Amino acid sequence: MKKYIKKNLSNKYPTKDITLDDKKNKLPLSTSKKSKKVIDIGNGITFGLKQIPIIAGPNGVESQKLMEDVAKCLVKNKIKIIRGHAYKPLTFPYRSAKYKESKSQGMDIMDKIKKNFGLKVVTEITEIRYLDRVCKTADILQIGSRNMQNLELLRECALTKKPLILKRHFGASLRDMLGAAEHILVEGNSKLILCERGVSIPHTHRDTSRFALDIQAIPALKELTNFPIISDPSHASFWAPWVPSLTLASIAAGCDGLILEIHKNPKKSAVDPLQPLNFRDFTKLLKTSRSVAKSIGKKI
Ligand code: PEP
Ligand code: MN
């Protein structure tokens, strides 16, 4: 780490967006364009090449049955990465009786899914104390938007050497995001995937849409960094009917992967029931996504 600490790195002229000086002195690892960063997850899955891997699943690991139904839908559609959180921060501390973090039991369910369906697992890590359990099962750790600048968590996640998805906080500039990424890279872990998941703006065009997908962040990040950029239209819009358009727009904008929330019965989702696609709409979306990807020389 010392080798990156240079003299005269004062914050005398702080900026909002990234300057040439930032690139040279503060973000040398995240903005280096020396080599194309390809994150290989195994099982033929790579982020950062022509392939656009899709990570799909419910918000939370609600039950083994739900995860099995989701896994079957993914296998049928040749999607190789399942998501589902066993540890999950919520905006308010009060949880509905229906919703409980499944914690280590949820991770046990994900273990079974992994073994029985041959899928890779993405799950969120919320606190350092859960790292050991989560790392036993997860192929990729997701650092959620609310934890983007939880620097101690970033450091410990980096030290696991696992591939990491770093989600952009909904109020963070790209400078803030790449600054957070730099905290991971400086620890020697460059298996990093950056995720755009929507930002807070004055109008989100629907009272239940909390964020707006910042499509422009995709080409902007591509200009700045060589790490794969993925998009999460589900958490951005919070509204399933908008997810297909935003997915196709993300592919057209050059994303290197997607996170899509899906549920067997969205209305019954324990959290954010307006957001997940049902299996039929997901399957339909994959079809159009595959043709948009093909039209720009990529593959899903
Ligand atoms: C999620 O992936 O389920 C999630 C809540 O993401 P975010 O941190 O982007 O809100
Ligand atoms: Mn969610």
Image: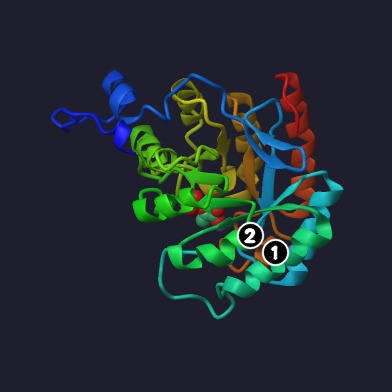
Classify mark 2: residues with Cα within 10 Å, few (<14), some (14-19) or many (20+): many
Check disc 2 and report the residue beneath it.
84
* Up/down of 54 relative to 65, above or below: above
Q: Are marks 1 and 2 in contact (CB under 8 Å)?
A: yes
**Viewer-proximal residue among 295 and 17:** 17
At x 43%, y 30%, the residue is 30
> Which image quadrant: the N terminus?
top left
**What is the number of callouts on the image?**
2
Q: Is residue 48 left or right of residue 68?
A: left
Q: Say which amino acid is labelled 1.
A: Met
Q: Residue furthest left?
A: 12
Q: CA distance from mark 1 to mark 2?
A: 8 Å
**Viewer-proximal residue among 34 and 213:** 34
At x 48%, y 45%, the residue is 167
Q: Is residue 228 left or right of residue 267?
A: left
Q: Give the x, y percent position of residue 16.
A: 27, 31
Classify mark 1: residues with Cα within 10 Å, few (<14), some (14-19) or many (20+): many
The residue at label 1 has a CB less than 8 Å from ligand 1: no
- Residue 110, disc: 1
Q: Give the x, y percent position of residue 151.
A: 35, 51
At x 47%, y 61%, the residue is 126
Task: Say if residue 183 shows up in the picture.
Answer: yes
Q: Say which amino acid is labelled 2.
A: Gly
**Viewer-proximal residue among 70 and 26:** 26
